[in-house]
Image (cartoon, rainbow, N blue to C red):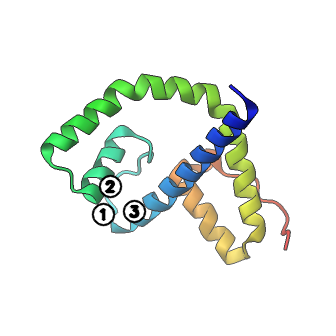
Amino acid sequence: MTAAWIRGSALLVVVLAVGIAIGVEFGRARRPATDAPRSAMDSATMMRTFDRELSLDSSQHAGIAAVLGHRQAEIDSAWRTLQPNIRAAMDSTQREIIGFLNDTQRAKFLALIRGAHGAARMPAVPMRQR
């Protein structure tokens, strides 16, 4: 693997993660408060999102669930390999974004990240850069 491929892959994953985080936050607004929060990457959560957003029929649901089921080990293995670089890229990206936000926006952004990734994935908040 070349450094460019790793950087490109990391960027793609960061964009995907931000998109999922935003989608989860908007979905949460429509979800009843009694639903237990789950990871956006959890297969069951993804399937509920696909069902809701894509209006899958039962055949499509079964086929996609099967794909997710038999690909999960491959995805997990790839994630373990790339995770350190991806985490570092996500953390630095979040810190840079925070630098552009005012206090109110920063609090909302951190809540989005917390909702998508939990408190363990919260970036260290830098001093205001603007």
Q: Residue furthest left?
A: 58
Q: Amino acid at mark 1?
A: Pro
Mark 3 — residue? 28
Compare marks 2 and 3 and give the one earlier in the sequence.
3
Q: Nearer the viewer, residue 71 or 33?
A: 71
Q: To which quarter of the image does residue 5 belong?
A: top right
Q: CA distance from mark 1 to mark 2?
A: 6 Å
* Rendering coords of residue 59 (x, y %): 14, 41
Mark 2 — residue? 35
Asked if the residue at tag 3 contacts the one at tag 2, i.e. Cβ–Cβ closer than 8 Å, the answer is no
* Label 1 Cα crowd, 10 Å radius (few <14 / some 14-19 / many 20+): few
* Label 2 Cα crowd, 10 Å radius (few <14 / some 14-19 / many 20+): few
* Rendering coords of residue 17 (x, y %): 54, 50
Q: Amino acid at mark 2?
A: Asp
Any mark on residue 32, and which? Answer: 1
Q: What residue is shown at x 44% (from left), y 48% (from top)?
A: 40
* Rendering coords of residue 74 (x, y %): 46, 23
Q: Amino acid at mark 3?
A: Arg
Which element is circle 1 on? loop
Any mark on residue 78, and which? Answer: none
Q: Nearer the viewer, residue 6 or 95?
A: 6
Asked if the residue at tag 2 contacts the one at tag 1, i.e. Cβ–Cβ closer than 8 Å, the answer is yes
* Label 3 Cα crowd, 10 Å radius (few <14 / some 14-19 / many 20+): some
Q: What residue is shown at x 55% (from left), y 61% (from top)?
A: 112
Q: CA distance from mark 3 to mark 1?
A: 8 Å
Q: CA distance from mark 2 to mark 3?
A: 9 Å
Q: What residue is shown at x 66% (from left), y 51% (from top)?
A: 122
Which element is circle 3 on? helix
Indicate left or right for 109 with 21 as reference: right
